[in-house]
Image: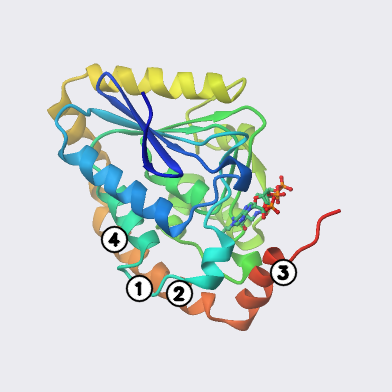
Amino acid sequence: MMDRITQEILVEQQESVLLVRLHRPDKKNALTLAMYEGLTATLNEAMQDAQIRAVVLAGSGDSFTSGNDIADFLAAPPQGEDSPVFRFLAALRQFEKPLVAAVTGLAVGIGVTALLHCDLVYARAGATLALPFVNLGLCPEAGSSLLLPRLLGYPRAAELLLLGEPFTAEQALDWGLINGLAADAEATLALALERAQQLARRPAAAVRLTKSLLKRDEAEKLRETIALEGRHFVELLNSPEAAVALHAFATRRRS
Ligand code: COA
């Protein structure tokens, strides 16, 4: 049975796997302050709960998430490390158990950068992903300025982060950004859950240690990068360029 952490974060334990769903489908699961807080609390509790051996993060409706809620960026921009978005990123970075993402549809901004912290990522065929930070007058976050060039090489990372052009789940697979595709949202979630169950059946201590060894090389640099990006992000959010771009989205008229 699904439990509601907040109105818009649903969790369900399936054996030793915790399924966490972003559930604000009418807003493409754009992440509000309350949703970040719900996610942070859920991850921190899952870390402490010995019965949980893996976590699956998924969207609802036709989206994974369209990123930070733009109205929240305008009304209550993050101020520093204690802001809900940065506390969520810290919980994600420090999460020691396996994290599997089911990109059930569109993923934008933190919807893509959060994937860089997941251990396995599966996406719906044809899903669109984008990192439009620069187009909004903002800079990368979640350590993506470090992780993306390491993963994809500088030229491709520069294209994605400097131009902010959308790309497809198929391209993401081809580039090694994700692990696999499934035909539709339901199949994507089923695949992610199956892989999480497989992880949950492996010896927990060995899985956890292997994850920490895989991430050891970048751990300290990642912490520093997230902090540095965060300071620049907060400054840029207060810039005139960002104000214009964010207001343009918030007040746009669609025919
Ligand atoms: N913040 C706040 N609201 C958002 C949102 C976001 N990040 N993304 C989508 N929404 C809202 C829309 O305002 C719209 O609300 P409304 O029906 O009350 O007008 C609803 O979700 C549906 O979005 P819509 O734009 O109509 O869908 P679309 O399929 O035409 O476009 C996107 C989807 C994601 C391409 C487009 O909504 C978008 O560009 N969103 C902003 C993404 C973004 O820049 N995120 C921040 C990155 S740092």
Residue 94, numbered label: none
CA gap between label 1 and label 3 equals 25 Å
Labels 1 and 3: the sequence-earlier one:
1
> Left of 177 or right of it: where is 158?
right
Q: Residues within 10 Å of mark 1 (few under 14, many from 20)?
A: some
Labels 4 and 3: the sequence-earlier one:
4
> Left of 16 or right of it: where is 128?
right
Residue in the picture at 48% in, 56% down:
32
Q: Residues within 10 Å of mark 4 (few under 14, many from 20)?
A: some
Asked if disc 1 is less than 8 Å from ligand 1, the answer is no
Residue 248, numbered label: 3
Q: Mark 3: which amino acid?
A: Ala
Task: Determine whether label 2 and label 3 are within 8 Å by CB.
Answer: no
- Can residue 212 be seen at all in this image of the molecule? no
CA gap between label 2 and label 1 equals 7 Å
Residue in the picture at 45% in, 74% down:
234
Q: Position of residue 25 (x, y in %)?
A: 58, 40
Q: Position of residue 199 (x, y in %)?
A: 28, 22
Q: Position of residue 63 (x, y in %)?
A: 59, 38
Q: Mark 2: which amino acid?
A: Val
CA gap between label 2 and label 4 equals 17 Å
- Can residue 63 be seen at all in this image of the molecule? yes
Q: Residues within 10 Å of mark 3 (few under 14, many from 20)?
A: few
**Quadrant of the image for the N terminus?**
top left
In the depicted structure, whether residue 100 falls above or below residue 231: above
In the depicted structure, whether residue 82 falls above or below residue 18: below
Q: Which residue is disc 1 drawn over?
A: 80
